[in-house]
Image (cartoon, rainbow, N blue to C red):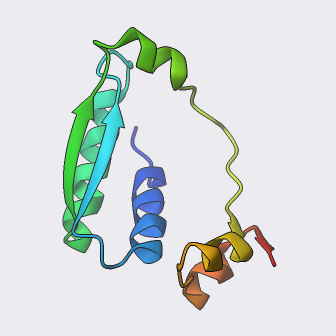
Amino acid sequence: MTTDLEEKRLGILHQLLPKAELLAVLCNPKFPTINATLSEIETAARKIGQRLVIFRASDEPELEVALPISRSTKFDFVVNLKTATELGLDIPPALLALADEVIE
């Protein structure tokens, strides 16, 4: 069964960085559902015309230790406007409307 979670994630990233020509995906090819997840990401990218590069990292044990991955069941979308401003990012109003919380 597939979900639209990856499409939402990529859509949010695309709204945040609309001028990005290329996005990278880091994945562990040993993760049981990685093929379905990557398929969802690639489909979502095609829908919005976004180029992707996929990196697989199961060969580097230190990377797995540094970036432990678990599948969350609840996601909160929080936008920190102060940090965004300091980074020179303009957050579109449509993206702010989707946020569960906006930190002024």
Count of numbered labels shown in the rendering: 0
Q: Residue at x 44, y 55 (%)?
A: 4
- Left or right side of 89 for 74: right
Q: Residue at x 38, y 18 (%)?
A: 32
Q: Which quarter of the rendered picture does the N terminus lie within? A: top left
Q: Nearer the viewer, residue 2 or 38?
A: 38
Which x, y percent locates residue 24? 29, 49
Outermost residue, bottom side: 93
Quarter holding residue 91: bottom right
Q: Residue at x 70, y 44 (%)?
A: 74
Give the answer, above or below, for where 22 lies relative to 82. above
- Left or right side of 97 for 71: left
Q: Nearer the viewer, residue 72 or 17?
A: 17
Which x, y percent locates residue 90? 54, 85
Which x, y percent locates residue 15? 44, 76
Q: Residue at x 39, y 43 (%)?
A: 2
Quarter holding residue 93: bottom right
Outermost residue, front side: 86
Give the answer, above or below, for where 28 lies relative to 49. above
Q: Which quarter of the rendered picture does the C terminus lie within? A: bottom right
- Left or right side of 86 for 15: left
Which x, y percent locates residue 57? 30, 23
